[in-house]
Image (cartoon, helix red, strand yellow):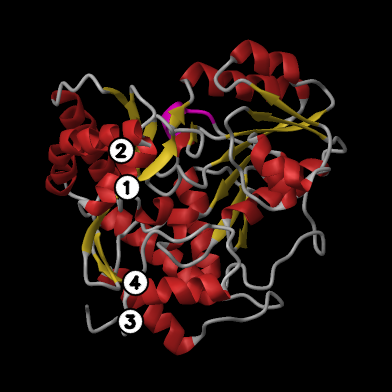
Amino acid sequence: MTERASQSSGDYLARYERSLIGVFGMPQLVLTHGDGCYVWDADGRQYLDLLGGIAVNALGHNHPSLVTAISKQASEMVHVSNFFTSPAQIALAERLLALSGAPEGSGVFFCNSGTEAIEGAIKISRRTGRTHLVAAAGSFHGRTTGALALTSKAIYREPFDPLIPDVSFVPYDDVDALRAAVTEDTAAIFLEPIQGEGGVVPASEAYLRAARQVADETGALLVLDEIQTGVGRTGDWFAFQHYGVQPDVMTLAKGLGGGVPVGAIVAFGERVRAMLTAGQHGTTFGGNPLAAASGLAVLDEIESADLLSHARVTGDHFADAVAALGDDRIVEVRGRGLLRAVVLRDEVAPALTAAAREAGFIVNPVAPTALRIAPPLIVTGEQLDTFVTALPALLDTASTATQGA
């Protein structure tokens, strides 16, 4: 047992079960601390973190730049109400506008999470005077009631029906279906450039270009959910830049704070920015000095360490290394940068995740046949190679466990 944990994992989990609402089920691990791309549990076991808090811990754990920024800001000011602002909040907004190439007159709204950013984007869409929304099958936009109405899985939505009405779901990456669904009554099209929870499924360039075109033709807004793909995750600052398609609204969260809760809405252009005016939206904690300082530290480190290039090179290295295994149980590796899915022939991803955890790797079964890899952007090729080397044996274990279930 490490000095950081006073009890065993079993003891902590018993306390967890007695005291927390069980919306996540029983946690798989009790983690006590981390360093770089590694974390340790309450029993002293070390794991290579290839999930990064679900694409959140962009700089890994205990990164000195982020720790210094948080410590400095905490010693000065953690929170002020949004009757006021702070230098860090202004600087972070300016930085996001510059990095996204937003035109003059654009603006940023800060919140605390991705689902809050989606809620704000829905409110912006209502200011068009229309109510119809179009989203994609396989989408995941959050669990608050507005965001939930745009999330395609019925199992998430149905317990809370009726949600906001007038939402149409269309097959993802199907240009014809999108064109048929979007009309002059459509307020906004909500799309992920790469569907994260849907299985790490990238959109084609033709699809996003068609979405931009049909939005322009009908007067609908194009909202790109970059909560999982943004902030360097795919090897560009934002995934839309790879496609050359500028949205009207972009939503951000996850990696932006490196683990400190922060979300953002970027409204592109003066027309869209003006759709929310004073008193029409708000938040208590959004954009507070601590969150803003964290966001600036993350962006500074990504830029100074050239982590965009690193994400591209390391992600491609991972995909090539998996392909080189020549294992017919692996169909492909899809995604971009350091948001990847190992696509499997058989429905063994949950068992493979359990086997990986026993072997000291944290990964995620994003679908029965897809294993998500979203490590810190600082992960090395050598660290990824340790997982690739272990993968055939882990598949053996997973296949045996699945057959015996």
Whether residue 213 appears in this view of the structure is: yes
Does the CB distance between marks 2 and 1 fall below 8 Å? yes
Type of residue at label 4?
A: Ser
Q: Which element carries disc 4, helix, strand or loop? A: helix
Residue 7: mark in rendering:
3
Q: Is residue 139 magenta?
A: no
Q: What residue is shown at x 69% (from left), y 45% (from top)?
A: 148
Out of 58 and 238, give the one closest to the viewer: 58
Type of residue at label 3?
A: Gln
For label 4, the crowd category at 10 Å Cα-Cα, with few meaning under 14, some 14 to 19 and many 20 or more, is many
For label 3, the crowd category at 10 Å Cα-Cα, with few meaning under 14, some 14 to 19 and many 20 or more, is few
Q: Measuring from the top left, give residue 349's x and y in whole percent.
A: 36, 36
Residue range highlighted in magenta: 241-245
Q: Describe residue 122's horizontal placement relative to residue 193 as left or right.
A: right
Residue 9: mark in rendering:
4
Q: Is residue 243 magenta?
A: yes
The quarter of the picture where residue 177 lies is: top right
